[in-house]
Image (spheres, rainbow, N blue to C red):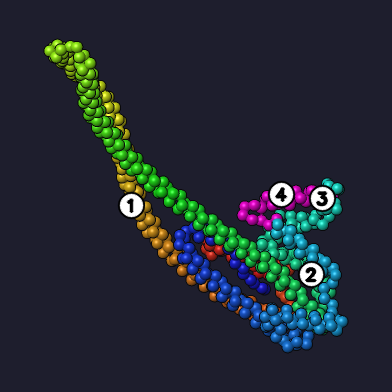
Amino acid sequence: MGAGCCVQDSKGNKKKQAQYKNQNDYQNDRQYIREQQKEYERIQKQNQKKHNAQKFQGQGIQLGGTGHEEQDDPYIQRQKALEAAEKRQQQGNYRGISKDGQADYELRKKKYEMAEQYKNQNNGRENYLREAWKKKQICHPDRNQNSINSCEDMYPQYVWAYEILSDPQRKEDYDLYGITKQDTNKIFERQNYQYEKNQRYQGMDNSQNNEEFDKEAYKKEYREQYRKQREKEKKEEEKKKEQLKQQEKIEEEKREEERKKKQEEEEELFRQKQEYEQYLKKMANEELKKLQEKQEETQNINTTIYSYIGIGIVIFIVIITTFIYFLFDMFNQENKLSISERQQKHENEFEQLKIKTNQTAQNITKNQKKYEYQLEDKIDQKLDDYKKQSDIEFSSISERQQKHETEFEQLKIETNQTTQNITENQKKFKDELELKNQRFFSNWQNEADKTSKYILEQQITNQSIQKKINSINEGFQNLVKNGPGWFQADLSIQFFFEKPVFLDPPKNECANKTIICFIYY
Protein backbone atom coordinates (compact mmCIF):
# COMPACT_ATOMS: atom_id res chain seq x y z
CA MET A 1 0.00 0.00 0.00
CA GLY A 2 0.96 3.63 -0.54
CA ALA A 3 -0.47 6.60 1.27
CA GLY A 4 -0.38 10.38 0.86
CA CYS A 5 -2.14 13.52 2.04
CA CYS A 6 -2.67 16.88 0.43
CA VAL A 7 -4.15 19.94 2.16
CA GLN A 8 -6.36 22.39 0.35
CA ASP A 9 -7.92 25.66 1.61
CA SER A 10 -11.71 25.82 1.70
CA LYS A 11 -14.42 28.49 2.12
CA GLY A 12 -14.29 28.00 5.85
CA ASN A 13 -11.11 30.11 5.98
CA LYS A 14 -12.96 33.14 4.65
CA LYS A 15 -15.56 32.86 7.37
CA LYS A 16 -12.84 32.55 9.97
CA GLN A 17 -11.10 35.60 8.58
CA ALA A 18 -14.33 37.59 8.88
CA GLN A 19 -14.45 36.76 12.59
CA TYR A 20 -10.98 38.26 13.12
CA LYS A 21 -11.15 42.03 13.24
CA ASN A 22 -7.42 42.41 13.80
CA GLN A 23 -5.56 41.17 10.70
CA ASN A 24 -2.29 40.64 12.55
CA ASP A 25 -3.86 38.01 14.81
CA TYR A 26 -5.35 36.21 11.85
CA GLN A 27 -2.03 36.20 9.97
CA ASN A 28 -0.11 34.93 12.99
CA ASP A 29 -2.51 32.00 13.38
CA ARG A 30 -2.26 31.21 9.69
CA GLN A 31 1.54 31.28 9.74
CA TYR A 32 1.68 28.94 12.72
CA ILE A 33 -0.59 26.43 10.97
CA ARG A 34 1.41 26.65 7.72
CA GLU A 35 4.66 26.02 9.55
CA GLN A 36 3.21 22.85 11.06
CA GLN A 37 2.06 21.68 7.63
CA LYS A 38 5.52 22.32 6.14
CA GLU A 39 7.20 20.35 8.93
CA TYR A 40 4.82 17.43 8.35
CA GLU A 41 5.50 17.47 4.59
CA ARG A 42 9.24 17.68 5.15
CA ILE A 43 9.20 14.64 7.46
CA GLN A 44 7.09 12.74 4.94
CA LYS A 45 9.51 13.54 2.10
CA GLN A 46 12.48 12.41 4.16
CA ASN A 47 10.78 9.09 4.84
CA GLN A 48 10.03 8.65 1.14
CA LYS A 49 13.64 9.42 0.18
CA LYS A 50 14.95 6.89 2.67
CA HIS A 51 12.53 4.28 1.41
CA ASN A 52 13.44 4.93 -2.24
CA ALA A 53 17.15 4.85 -1.45
CA GLN A 54 16.81 1.49 0.28
CA LYS A 55 14.61 0.16 -2.49
CA PHE A 56 16.65 1.20 -5.54
CA GLN A 57 20.17 0.93 -4.14
CA GLY A 58 20.73 -2.53 -5.62
CA GLN A 59 19.20 -1.53 -8.95
CA GLY A 60 21.44 1.53 -9.29
CA ILE A 61 24.54 -0.62 -8.75
CA GLN A 62 23.36 -3.04 -11.47
CA LEU A 63 22.84 -0.12 -13.89
CA GLY A 64 26.38 1.16 -13.36
CA GLY A 65 25.62 3.88 -10.80
CA THR A 66 26.69 4.46 -7.24
CA GLY A 67 23.34 3.53 -5.72
CA HIS A 68 22.75 7.04 -4.28
CA GLU A 69 21.23 8.86 -7.27
CA GLU A 70 17.80 9.23 -5.64
CA GLN A 71 19.30 10.92 -2.59
CA ASP A 72 20.46 13.90 -4.67
CA ASP A 73 18.30 17.00 -5.15
CA PRO A 74 16.12 17.18 -8.29
CA TYR A 75 18.07 20.20 -9.53
CA ILE A 76 21.35 18.20 -9.37
CA GLN A 77 19.69 15.26 -11.13
CA ARG A 78 18.54 17.56 -13.95
CA GLN A 79 22.04 19.00 -14.35
CA LYS A 80 23.54 15.52 -14.53
CA ALA A 81 20.98 14.50 -17.14
CA LEU A 82 21.71 17.57 -19.28
CA GLU A 83 25.49 16.98 -19.08
CA ALA A 84 25.04 13.36 -20.15
CA ALA A 85 22.80 14.46 -23.05
CA GLU A 86 25.42 16.98 -24.25
CA LYS A 87 28.13 14.32 -24.18
CA ARG A 88 26.00 11.90 -26.17
CA GLN A 89 25.10 14.64 -28.66
CA GLN A 90 28.79 15.39 -29.22
CA GLN A 91 29.49 11.68 -29.72
CA GLY A 92 26.55 11.33 -32.14
CA ASN A 93 24.57 8.86 -29.99
CA TYR A 94 21.92 11.31 -28.79
CA ARG A 95 18.39 9.99 -28.94
CA GLY A 96 16.40 12.75 -27.21
CA ILE A 97 12.69 13.26 -27.82
CA SER A 98 11.18 12.09 -31.08
CA LYS A 99 9.61 14.51 -33.56
CA ASP A 100 6.14 13.26 -32.70
CA GLY A 101 6.75 13.90 -29.01
CA GLN A 102 8.05 17.43 -29.68
CA ALA A 103 5.03 18.25 -31.87
CA ASP A 104 2.69 16.88 -29.24
CA TYR A 105 4.46 18.99 -26.60
CA GLU A 106 4.01 22.20 -28.63
CA LEU A 107 0.34 21.43 -29.33
CA ARG A 108 -0.37 20.81 -25.65
CA LYS A 109 1.45 24.00 -24.73
CA LYS A 110 -0.89 26.00 -26.99
CA LYS A 111 -3.88 24.28 -25.44
CA TYR A 112 -2.74 25.19 -21.92
CA GLU A 113 -2.63 28.85 -22.91
CA MET A 114 -6.09 28.57 -24.43
CA ALA A 115 -7.51 26.88 -21.34
CA GLU A 116 -6.18 29.66 -19.12
CA GLN A 117 -8.28 32.15 -21.07
CA TYR A 118 -11.43 30.18 -20.21
CA LYS A 119 -10.36 29.25 -16.70
CA ASN A 120 -13.00 29.32 -14.00
CA GLN A 121 -12.99 32.37 -11.74
CA ASN A 122 -15.20 33.63 -8.89
CA ASN A 123 -18.77 32.46 -9.68
CA GLY A 124 -18.15 32.54 -13.45
CA ARG A 125 -18.01 28.89 -14.47
CA GLU A 126 -21.18 28.76 -16.62
CA ASN A 127 -20.36 31.94 -18.55
CA TYR A 128 -16.91 30.67 -19.57
CA LEU A 129 -18.37 27.30 -20.60
CA ARG A 130 -20.98 29.02 -22.77
CA GLU A 131 -18.34 31.16 -24.48
CA ALA A 132 -16.19 28.11 -25.22
CA TRP A 133 -19.24 26.21 -26.52
CA LYS A 134 -20.30 29.09 -28.81
CA LYS A 135 -16.82 29.45 -30.28
CA LYS A 136 -16.68 25.69 -30.78
CA GLN A 137 -19.95 25.88 -32.72
CA ILE A 138 -18.72 28.82 -34.81
CA CYS A 139 -15.41 27.16 -35.68
CA HIS A 140 -16.94 23.76 -36.43
CA PRO A 141 -16.15 22.83 -40.09
CA ASP A 142 -19.59 21.27 -40.70
CA ARG A 143 -21.52 24.30 -39.44
CA ASN A 144 -19.35 27.03 -40.94
CA GLN A 145 -17.42 25.89 -43.99
CA ASN A 146 -16.25 29.38 -44.90
CA SER A 147 -14.21 29.64 -41.67
CA ILE A 148 -12.27 26.40 -42.11
CA ASN A 149 -9.01 28.16 -42.92
CA SER A 150 -9.28 30.54 -39.95
CA CYS A 151 -10.57 27.99 -37.40
CA GLU A 152 -8.60 24.95 -38.45
CA ASP A 153 -6.01 25.43 -35.72
CA MET A 154 -8.33 26.87 -33.07
CA TYR A 155 -11.08 24.23 -33.11
CA PRO A 156 -9.14 21.47 -31.25
CA GLN A 157 -8.03 24.00 -28.64
CA TYR A 158 -11.62 25.09 -27.95
CA VAL A 159 -12.66 21.46 -27.64
CA TRP A 160 -9.84 20.74 -25.21
CA ALA A 161 -10.70 23.81 -23.08
CA TYR A 162 -14.37 22.82 -22.98
CA GLU A 163 -13.50 19.29 -21.89
CA ILE A 164 -11.32 20.51 -19.01
CA LEU A 165 -13.88 23.01 -17.73
CA SER A 166 -16.78 20.58 -17.95
CA ASP A 167 -14.95 17.81 -16.02
CA PRO A 168 -14.62 18.87 -12.32
CA GLN A 169 -11.80 16.41 -11.52
CA ARG A 170 -9.66 17.53 -14.48
CA LYS A 171 -10.39 21.16 -13.64
CA GLU A 172 -9.17 20.72 -10.05
CA ASP A 173 -5.94 19.13 -11.29
CA TYR A 174 -5.48 21.96 -13.77
CA ASP A 175 -6.03 24.65 -11.11
CA LEU A 176 -3.53 22.98 -8.74
CA TYR A 177 -0.78 21.85 -11.14
CA GLY A 178 -1.47 23.57 -14.46
CA ILE A 179 -1.82 20.18 -16.18
CA THR A 180 -3.97 17.13 -15.52
CA LYS A 181 -2.67 13.64 -14.83
CA GLN A 182 -4.42 12.27 -17.91
CA ASP A 183 -2.75 14.83 -20.19
CA THR A 184 0.72 14.17 -18.76
CA ASN A 185 0.32 10.47 -19.44
CA LYS A 186 -0.79 11.17 -23.03
CA ILE A 187 2.13 13.50 -23.71
CA PHE A 188 4.77 10.92 -22.76
CA GLU A 189 3.06 7.86 -24.25
CA ARG A 190 4.83 7.99 -27.63
CA GLN A 191 8.34 8.73 -26.48
CA ASN A 192 8.29 6.29 -23.54
CA TYR A 193 6.28 3.29 -24.76
CA GLN A 194 9.47 1.31 -25.44
CA TYR A 195 10.96 2.39 -22.13
CA GLU A 196 7.95 1.08 -20.19
CA LYS A 197 8.36 -2.35 -21.82
CA ASN A 198 12.10 -2.62 -21.13
CA GLN A 199 11.64 -1.30 -17.59
CA ARG A 200 10.74 -4.77 -16.29
CA TYR A 201 14.09 -6.26 -17.23
CA GLN A 202 17.08 -5.79 -14.96
CA GLY A 203 19.56 -5.38 -17.77
CA MET A 204 19.25 -1.76 -18.92
CA ASP A 205 21.58 0.60 -20.85
CA ASN A 206 22.87 3.89 -19.51
CA SER A 207 21.19 5.75 -22.37
CA GLN A 208 17.76 4.52 -21.25
CA ASN A 209 18.51 5.55 -17.67
CA ASN A 210 19.34 9.06 -18.89
CA GLU A 211 16.05 9.17 -20.78
CA GLU A 212 14.30 8.74 -17.45
CA PHE A 213 16.01 11.89 -16.16
CA ASP A 214 14.87 13.74 -19.30
CA LYS A 215 11.31 12.66 -18.63
CA GLU A 216 11.37 13.98 -15.08
CA ALA A 217 13.04 17.19 -16.24
CA TYR A 218 10.25 17.89 -18.71
CA LYS A 219 7.63 17.25 -16.07
CA LYS A 220 9.40 19.70 -13.76
CA GLU A 221 9.52 22.28 -16.53
CA TYR A 222 5.74 22.08 -16.85
CA ARG A 223 5.35 22.63 -13.12
CA GLU A 224 7.84 25.52 -13.12
CA GLN A 225 6.04 27.26 -15.97
CA TYR A 226 2.75 27.01 -14.14
CA ARG A 227 4.36 28.30 -10.92
CA LYS A 228 5.79 31.29 -12.76
CA GLN A 229 2.39 32.08 -14.21
CA ARG A 230 0.85 31.97 -10.75
CA GLU A 231 3.54 34.29 -9.42
CA LYS A 232 2.82 36.75 -12.22
CA GLU A 233 -0.87 36.68 -11.38
CA LYS A 234 -0.12 37.31 -7.71
CA LYS A 235 2.10 40.26 -8.61
CA GLU A 236 -0.64 41.70 -10.79
CA GLU A 237 -3.13 41.34 -7.97
CA GLU A 238 -0.74 43.12 -5.60
CA LYS A 239 -0.35 45.92 -8.13
CA LYS A 240 -4.13 46.27 -8.35
CA LYS A 241 -4.36 46.45 -4.57
CA GLU A 242 -1.69 49.16 -4.51
CA GLN A 243 -3.57 51.09 -7.19
CA LEU A 244 -6.76 50.85 -5.13
CA LYS A 245 -4.89 52.15 -2.07
CA GLN A 246 -3.54 55.05 -4.11
CA GLN A 247 -7.03 55.84 -5.37
CA GLU A 248 -8.34 55.83 -1.80
CA LYS A 249 -5.56 58.21 -0.76
CA ILE A 250 -6.42 60.51 -3.67
CA GLU A 251 -10.09 60.47 -2.69
CA GLU A 252 -9.20 61.30 0.91
CA GLU A 253 -7.07 64.21 -0.28
CA LYS A 254 -9.97 65.44 -2.41
CA ARG A 255 -12.28 65.26 0.59
CA GLU A 256 -9.82 67.23 2.70
CA GLU A 257 -9.54 69.85 -0.05
CA GLU A 258 -13.33 70.14 -0.25
CA ARG A 259 -13.53 70.49 3.51
CA LYS A 260 -10.88 73.23 3.43
CA LYS A 261 -12.75 74.99 0.63
CA LYS A 262 -15.95 74.94 2.67
CA GLN A 263 -14.14 76.43 5.65
CA GLU A 264 -12.66 79.15 3.45
CA GLU A 265 -16.08 79.93 1.98
CA GLU A 266 -17.59 80.22 5.45
CA GLU A 267 -14.77 82.53 6.53
CA GLU A 268 -15.27 84.64 3.41
CA LEU A 269 -19.02 84.93 4.10
CA PHE A 270 -18.33 86.03 7.68
CA ARG A 271 -15.77 88.54 6.45
CA GLN A 272 -18.18 89.89 3.81
CA LYS A 273 -20.85 90.28 6.46
CA GLN A 274 -18.51 92.32 8.64
CA GLU A 275 -17.48 94.47 5.67
CA TYR A 276 -21.14 95.06 4.78
CA GLU A 277 -21.90 96.22 8.31
CA GLN A 278 -18.91 98.57 8.24
CA TYR A 279 -20.06 99.85 4.85
CA LEU A 280 -23.51 100.65 6.23
CA LYS A 281 -21.96 102.55 9.14
CA LYS A 282 -19.79 104.55 6.72
CA MET A 283 -22.82 105.42 4.57
CA ALA A 284 -24.74 106.64 7.60
CA ASN A 285 -21.82 108.81 8.72
CA GLU A 286 -21.41 110.25 5.20
CA GLU A 287 -25.10 111.11 4.99
CA LEU A 288 -24.91 112.91 8.35
CA LYS A 289 -21.91 114.87 7.10
CA LYS A 290 -23.82 115.88 3.95
CA LEU A 291 -26.73 117.16 6.03
CA GLN A 292 -24.37 119.20 8.18
CA GLU A 293 -22.75 120.67 5.06
CA LYS A 294 -26.17 121.64 3.68
CA GLN A 295 -26.99 123.43 6.94
CA GLU A 296 -23.71 125.33 6.70
CA GLU A 297 -24.53 126.31 3.10
CA THR A 298 -27.87 127.77 4.18
CA GLN A 299 -26.09 129.84 6.81
CA ASN A 300 -23.65 131.08 4.17
CA ILE A 301 -26.60 132.07 1.97
CA ASN A 302 -27.95 134.31 4.75
CA THR A 303 -24.60 136.02 5.11
CA THR A 304 -24.45 136.63 1.36
CA ILE A 305 -27.94 138.19 1.44
CA TYR A 306 -26.90 140.66 4.12
CA SER A 307 -23.79 141.51 2.17
CA TYR A 308 -25.91 142.21 -0.94
CA ILE A 309 -28.09 144.61 1.12
CA GLY A 310 -25.03 146.57 2.27
CA ILE A 311 -23.83 146.82 -1.32
CA GLY A 312 -27.25 148.17 -2.36
CA ILE A 313 -27.07 150.88 0.31
CA VAL A 314 -23.63 151.95 -0.85
CA ILE A 315 -24.83 152.12 -4.44
CA PHE A 316 -27.79 154.21 -3.33
CA ILE A 317 -25.50 156.66 -1.51
CA VAL A 318 -23.31 156.95 -4.59
CA ILE A 319 -26.35 157.74 -6.72
CA ILE A 320 -27.40 160.43 -4.29
CA THR A 321 -23.97 162.03 -4.30
CA THR A 322 -23.91 162.05 -8.10
CA PHE A 323 -27.31 163.61 -8.16
CA ILE A 324 -26.19 166.29 -5.69
CA TYR A 325 -23.14 166.95 -7.79
CA PHE A 326 -25.34 167.37 -10.82
CA LEU A 327 -27.53 169.84 -9.01
CA PHE A 328 -24.50 171.81 -7.88
CA ASP A 329 -23.47 172.12 -11.48
CA MET A 330 -26.90 173.36 -12.39
CA PHE A 331 -26.72 175.86 -9.58
CA ASN A 332 -23.49 177.27 -10.89
CA GLN A 333 -25.00 177.57 -14.33
CA GLU A 334 -27.92 179.52 -13.16
CA ASN A 335 -26.22 182.83 -12.53
CA LYS A 336 -29.36 184.86 -13.00
CA LEU A 337 -31.03 183.50 -10.03
CA SER A 338 -30.27 185.00 -6.75
CA ILE A 339 -28.63 183.28 -3.92
CA SER A 340 -31.79 183.39 -1.83
CA GLU A 341 -33.87 181.82 -4.50
CA ARG A 342 -31.24 179.31 -5.03
CA GLN A 343 -31.15 178.52 -1.37
CA GLN A 344 -34.90 178.16 -1.25
CA LYS A 345 -34.85 175.93 -4.25
CA HIS A 346 -32.09 173.86 -2.83
CA GLU A 347 -33.87 173.58 0.46
CA ASN A 348 -37.07 172.54 -1.24
CA GLU A 349 -35.22 170.11 -3.41
CA PHE A 350 -33.31 168.87 -0.45
CA GLU A 351 -36.52 168.29 1.45
CA GLN A 352 -38.01 166.55 -1.51
CA LEU A 353 -34.91 164.42 -1.72
CA LYS A 354 -35.17 163.62 1.97
CA ILE A 355 -38.77 162.61 1.51
CA LYS A 356 -37.85 160.40 -1.44
CA THR A 357 -34.91 158.91 0.41
CA ASN A 358 -37.13 158.17 3.38
CA GLN A 359 -39.71 156.58 1.11
CA THR A 360 -37.05 154.54 -0.67
CA ALA A 361 -35.53 153.51 2.68
CA GLN A 362 -38.97 152.47 3.92
CA ASN A 363 -39.59 150.50 0.74
CA ILE A 364 -36.15 148.89 1.01
CA THR A 365 -36.77 147.87 4.60
CA LYS A 366 -40.16 146.44 3.67
CA ASN A 367 -38.72 144.51 0.74
CA GLN A 368 -35.82 143.32 2.89
CA LYS A 369 -38.19 141.98 5.53
CA LYS A 370 -40.33 140.24 2.89
CA TYR A 371 -37.25 138.69 1.32
CA GLU A 372 -35.99 137.57 4.72
CA TYR A 373 -39.34 135.97 5.55
CA GLN A 374 -39.40 134.19 2.19
CA LEU A 375 -35.85 132.93 2.68
CA GLU A 376 -36.66 131.68 6.15
CA ASP A 377 -39.73 129.83 4.84
CA LYS A 378 -37.73 128.21 2.05
CA ILE A 379 -34.94 127.22 4.43
CA ASP A 380 -37.44 125.70 6.85
CA GLN A 381 -39.08 123.72 4.04
CA LYS A 382 -35.75 122.42 2.81
CA LEU A 383 -34.69 121.48 6.33
CA ASP A 384 -37.95 119.61 6.83
CA ASP A 385 -37.44 117.75 3.57
CA TYR A 386 -33.89 116.83 4.51
CA LYS A 387 -35.04 115.67 7.93
CA LYS A 388 -37.77 113.49 6.42
CA GLN A 389 -35.32 111.92 3.95
CA SER A 390 -32.76 111.35 6.69
CA ASP A 391 -35.40 109.76 8.94
CA ILE A 392 -36.49 107.43 6.14
CA GLU A 393 -32.91 106.45 5.37
CA PHE A 394 -32.10 105.94 9.05
CA SER A 395 -35.19 103.76 9.44
CA SER A 396 -34.16 101.59 6.44
CA ILE A 397 -30.63 101.29 7.83
CA SER A 398 -31.94 100.30 11.25
CA GLU A 399 -34.22 97.69 9.69
CA ARG A 400 -31.28 96.20 7.77
CA GLN A 401 -29.19 96.14 10.91
CA GLN A 402 -31.97 94.36 12.76
CA LYS A 403 -32.27 91.78 9.95
CA HIS A 404 -28.53 91.11 10.01
CA GLU A 405 -28.59 90.81 13.78
CA THR A 406 -31.45 88.28 13.63
CA GLU A 407 -29.61 86.26 10.96
CA PHE A 408 -26.45 86.31 13.02
CA GLU A 409 -28.35 85.09 16.09
CA GLN A 410 -29.90 82.27 14.04
CA LEU A 411 -26.45 81.23 12.86
CA LYS A 412 -25.23 81.19 16.44
CA ILE A 413 -28.15 78.98 17.47
CA GLU A 414 -27.50 76.57 14.58
CA THR A 415 -23.79 76.35 15.40
CA ASN A 416 -24.59 75.61 19.04
CA GLN A 417 -27.01 72.88 17.99
CA THR A 418 -24.46 71.31 15.64
CA THR A 419 -21.79 71.34 18.35
CA GLN A 420 -24.20 69.67 20.77
CA ASN A 421 -25.07 67.00 18.18
CA ILE A 422 -21.40 66.38 17.48
CA THR A 423 -20.61 65.92 21.15
CA GLU A 424 -23.55 63.53 21.56
CA ASN A 425 -22.45 61.51 18.49
CA GLN A 426 -18.90 61.36 19.80
CA LYS A 427 -20.11 59.99 23.12
CA LYS A 428 -22.28 57.39 21.38
CA PHE A 429 -19.41 56.40 19.09
CA LYS A 430 -17.04 55.99 22.05
CA ASP A 431 -19.55 53.82 23.88
CA GLU A 432 -20.07 51.64 20.79
CA LEU A 433 -16.32 51.28 20.31
CA GLU A 434 -15.86 50.19 23.90
CA LEU A 435 -18.61 47.57 23.53
CA LYS A 436 -17.16 46.32 20.24
CA ASN A 437 -13.67 46.09 21.70
CA GLN A 438 -14.95 44.08 24.65
CA ARG A 439 -16.82 41.72 22.34
CA PHE A 440 -13.81 41.43 20.03
CA PHE A 441 -11.41 40.54 22.87
CA SER A 442 -13.87 37.97 24.25
CA ASN A 443 -14.32 36.37 20.80
CA TRP A 444 -10.60 36.48 20.17
CA GLN A 445 -9.87 34.64 23.43
CA ASN A 446 -12.46 31.98 22.59
CA GLU A 447 -11.00 31.50 19.11
CA ALA A 448 -7.48 31.32 20.47
CA ASP A 449 -8.58 28.54 22.81
CA LYS A 450 -10.21 26.72 19.91
CA THR A 451 -7.09 27.05 17.72
CA SER A 452 -4.87 25.74 20.51
CA LYS A 453 -7.16 22.73 20.94
CA TYR A 454 -7.20 22.17 17.18
CA ILE A 455 -3.38 22.33 17.01
CA LEU A 456 -3.03 19.75 19.78
CA GLU A 457 -5.47 17.45 18.00
CA GLN A 458 -3.58 17.92 14.74
CA GLN A 459 -0.27 17.06 16.40
CA ILE A 460 -1.81 13.86 17.77
CA THR A 461 -3.16 12.97 14.30
CA ASN A 462 0.26 13.67 12.72
CA GLN A 463 1.90 11.30 15.18
CA SER A 464 -0.66 8.61 14.38
CA ILE A 465 -0.12 9.16 10.63
CA GLN A 466 3.65 8.85 11.01
CA LYS A 467 3.17 5.56 12.83
CA LYS A 468 0.97 4.34 9.98
CA ILE A 469 3.58 5.44 7.40
CA ASN A 470 6.31 3.55 9.21
CA SER A 471 4.15 0.44 9.26
CA ILE A 472 3.42 0.89 5.52
CA ASN A 473 7.14 1.28 4.74
CA GLU A 474 7.88 -1.95 6.58
CA GLY A 475 5.22 -3.64 4.46
CA PHE A 476 6.85 -2.30 1.29
CA GLN A 477 10.22 -3.59 2.35
CA ASN A 478 8.75 -7.06 2.90
CA LEU A 479 7.12 -6.92 -0.54
CA VAL A 480 10.39 -5.84 -2.17
CA LYS A 481 12.28 -8.68 -0.53
CA ASN A 482 9.70 -11.37 -1.24
CA GLY A 483 8.05 -9.96 -4.38
CA PRO A 484 8.70 -10.70 -8.10
CA GLY A 485 11.76 -9.49 -10.01
CA TRP A 486 9.96 -7.01 -12.25
CA PHE A 487 8.65 -5.13 -9.18
CA GLN A 488 12.24 -4.53 -8.02
CA ALA A 489 13.10 -2.93 -11.34
CA ASP A 490 10.11 -0.58 -11.18
CA LEU A 491 11.06 3.00 -10.24
CA SER A 492 7.60 4.19 -9.13
CA ILE A 493 4.60 2.84 -7.25
CA GLN A 494 1.90 4.09 -9.65
CA PHE A 495 2.67 1.40 -12.29
CA PHE A 496 1.88 -1.40 -9.82
CA PHE A 497 -1.24 0.15 -8.24
CA GLU A 498 -3.98 1.02 -10.69
CA LYS A 499 -7.04 2.62 -9.08
CA PRO A 500 -7.06 5.42 -6.45
CA VAL A 501 -9.63 5.26 -3.67
CA PHE A 502 -10.63 8.59 -1.95
CA LEU A 503 -11.66 8.41 1.69
CA ASP A 504 -14.08 10.94 3.19
CA PRO A 505 -12.29 13.08 5.82
CA PRO A 506 -13.64 13.24 9.38
CA LYS A 507 -16.04 16.10 10.13
CA ASN A 508 -14.21 17.43 13.18
CA GLU A 509 -10.93 17.94 11.33
CA CYS A 510 -12.57 19.55 8.25
CA ALA A 511 -14.14 22.49 10.07
CA ASN A 512 -11.57 24.98 8.77
CA LYS A 513 -9.70 22.96 6.06
CA THR A 514 -10.55 20.17 3.62
CA ILE A 515 -8.09 17.27 4.08
CA ILE A 516 -8.16 14.83 1.17
CA CYS A 517 -6.51 11.50 1.97
CA PHE A 518 -6.03 8.91 -0.75
CA ILE A 519 -4.43 5.48 -0.90
CA TYR A 520 -3.48 3.05 -3.66
CA TYR A 521 -4.25 -0.61 -3.55
Does residue 189 sit above or below 95 in this rendering?
A: above
Residue indicated by mark 2: 188
Report, in whole angstroms, how far the alpha carbon at label 1 lies from the one at label 3: 70 Å
Q: Amino acid at mark 1?
A: Lys
Instruction: Nearest to the eye among marks 4 and 1: give it.
Output: 1
Residue indicated by mark 3: 140
Residue 84 left/right relative to 49: right
Q: Earlier in the sequence, mark 2 or mark 3?
A: 3
Residue indicated by mark 4: 130
Residue indicated by mark 1: 427
Residue 242 place in picture, x, y as percent: 56, 61
Residue 420 place in picture, x, y as percent: 31, 47
Q: Are marks 1 and 2 in contact (CB under 8 Å)?
A: no
The region drawn magenta spans 118-141
Q: Is residue 93 visible?
A: yes
Q: Earlier in the sequence, mark 1 or mark 2?
A: 2
Judge whether residue 404 is colored magenta.
no
Name the foreground residue: 392 vs 199.
392
Residue drawn where x is 37% and y is 43% of the image = 272
Judge whether residue 135 is colored magenta.
yes
Q: Amino acid at mark 2?
A: Phe
